[in-house]
Amino acid sequence: MEIKLNLKMPASYFYQKILESVLFDIKQQTGDKLTEAQLPNYSYDKQFGKYRATLKITQLIKDQSYHYETTSTRGSYQSSYDIFANGPQSIEVIYRENAKANGKLQQTNDMLMAFVMGFMRKRGFKKMLKQIEKAYQAEQ
């Protein structure tokens, strides 16, 4: 899945919101209170309902990108946020998600779910990005 969206906010604001979310999730899952400098290559276990997975931060470039990989017994998922400044108050965000399932049955299930749920997931994700934009505008 890939989503591209232009937003009216500085790259630094969007990056900070991602960072806050990541640090909060790590604190919730592990109890660790980390700094941004400790995040590159950091990995931790996370509970997803009845499944447990390991998340690893694979790339973190200030105001430009956040990439991570989620690995479980079901497969691995690479997700990335790339932020491109179009000016001081405008960015393009590109979110990408790729799945590599372990086993043919899981691959078939993932493809079916991507087809069925893809539209709704994209719509929900775009709505979340727009909410970040609205929060920025409300602070101004």
Image (cartoon, rainbow, N blue to C red):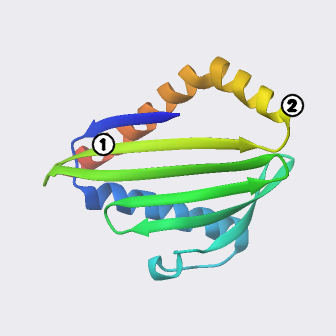
**Viewed as shown, does residue 77 lie left or right of 60?**
right
Query: Residue sitting at 44 percent across and 57 percent down?
Result: 18
Query: Residue sitting at 68 percent across and 55 percent down?
Result: 70
Mark 2: give few (<14), some (14-19) or many (20+) Cα within 10 Å.
few
**Viewed as shown, does residue 60 lie left or right of 99?**
left
Query: Residue sitting at 57 percent across and 66 percent down?
Result: 57
| Callout 2 touching callout 1 (CB < 8 Å) | no
**Viewed as shown, does residue 97 lie left or right of 55?**
left
Which residue ends up furthest to the front in the rendered image? 104
Choose the circle earlier in sequence order: 2 or 1: 2
Tag 1 residue: 133
> Which mark is in front, 2 or 1?
2
Which is more toward the observer, 14 or 2? 2
Q: Callout 2, which amino acid?
A: Leu
**Viewed as shown, does residue 93 lie left or right of 23?**
left
Q: Position of residue 113 (x, y in %)?
A: 71, 24
Of the numbered discs in the image, which one, if any, rests on residue 12?
none
Q: Secondary structure at mark 1?
A: helix
Q: Secondary structure at mark 2?
A: helix
